[in-house]
Image (tube, rainbow, N blue to C red):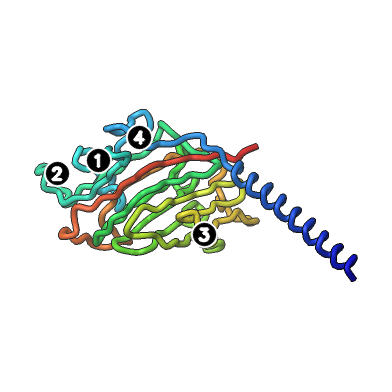
Amino acid sequence: MKRVYLYNIGMLALLLAVMLLASCMSDKGKGNEWKLVWEENFDGNEIDTTVWSKIPRGGSDWDNYMSSHDTLFNVGDGNLILRGIVNTILPNDTAPYLTGGVYSKKKKTFGLGKLEIRAKLNGARGAWPAFWMLPESGPYPDGGEIDIMEHLSFDDFVYHTVHSHYTLNLKEKIPNQGGRSPINLEGYNIYTLESYQDSLVFYVNNNSSERFMYPRIETDKKGQFPFADHEFFLLLDMQLGGSWVGVVNPDDLPVDMAIDWVRFYEKQE
């Protein structure tokens, strides 16, 4: 019996050693899975115009109040601040509100890999801040649209959504094109998009257990997964009002968001 007992103890010790080694190898693999290849820390006193441009005004809900006025932008203390305000500063501009946003169009693009954005959102009725991506070239929506984060008013969660010819023009509903994640309203959150040949994965604060994944599927319908076929530029913008978020309460303004950093990683070979 003593020999059997010692044998069992020895086997248990061997098993624990193997498990520990496997754990260490697994942790090592996880640590080397992604390689940081680019980052923007907003460490200066102004926007880096080699990477970012101010978003011009357009005719859509998301950009119809965009302005390049300096009041809407600030770089300091390692953050980019983007604001939405009541328009009391441009008397010749008939827009009731003004918003600030930047994008990397024609300057910096992103392909397959992991994109992370650390930011603090502040609520206001009708506020609609967003981090999202559009293809550098090609007609919309054939190349797709990737909405990493959209926040509405005072919600304690954010939306993740994809758009394409498949979802918008063909109005296909499978697979589900959107999900949402909880956020900390009082502080900074990290918004993550992982882009692969066969899927897009979204989550917040490294909580991959509460994630939204949009997969490539077998289908005879056109344009279901264009996201691996293009380079995308990034948009970071404060938006106000529109058919989705609803009316703005001017008493809640000004509103802003602070973007601490943007990082892009590629898979290790």
Q: Earlier in the sequence, mark 3 or mark 2?
A: 2
Q: Which type of secondary structure does the marked residue at label 3 adopt? A: loop
- Which mark's residue is nearer the viewer, 1 or 2? 1
Q: Residue at x 42, y 41 (%)?
A: 262
- Which mark's residue is nearer the viewer, 4 or 3? 3
Q: Does residue 70 lie above or below 141 as drawn?
A: above
Q: Quadrant of the N terminus?
A: bottom right
Q: Residue at x 34, y 36 (%)?
A: 42
Q: Earlier in the sequence, mark 4 or mark 2?
A: 4
Return the residue at label 2. Answer: 93
Return the residue at label 3. Answer: 211
Q: Does residue 76 lie above or below 177 as drawn?
A: above
How many other residues sit within 10 Å of disc 3, few (<14), some (14-19) or many (≥20)? some
Q: Does residue 232 lie above or below 164 as drawn?
A: above
Q: CA distance from mark 4 to mark 3?
A: 29 Å
Instruction: Give the left or right position of residue 75, taking residue 226 as reference.
Output: left
User: How far across and down, in percent of the image, does residue 203 sit?
Assistant: 49, 56
Return the residue at label 4. Answer: 52
> CB under 8 Å between callouts 4 and 1?
no
Q: Which type of secondary structure does the marked residue at label 2 adopt? A: loop
Callout 1, which amino acid? Phe
Q: Earlier in the sequence, mark 3 or mark 1?
A: 1
Return the residue at label 1. Answer: 73
How many other residues sit within 10 Å of disc 2, few (<14), some (14-19) or many (≥20)? few
> CB under 8 Å between callouts 4 and 2?
no
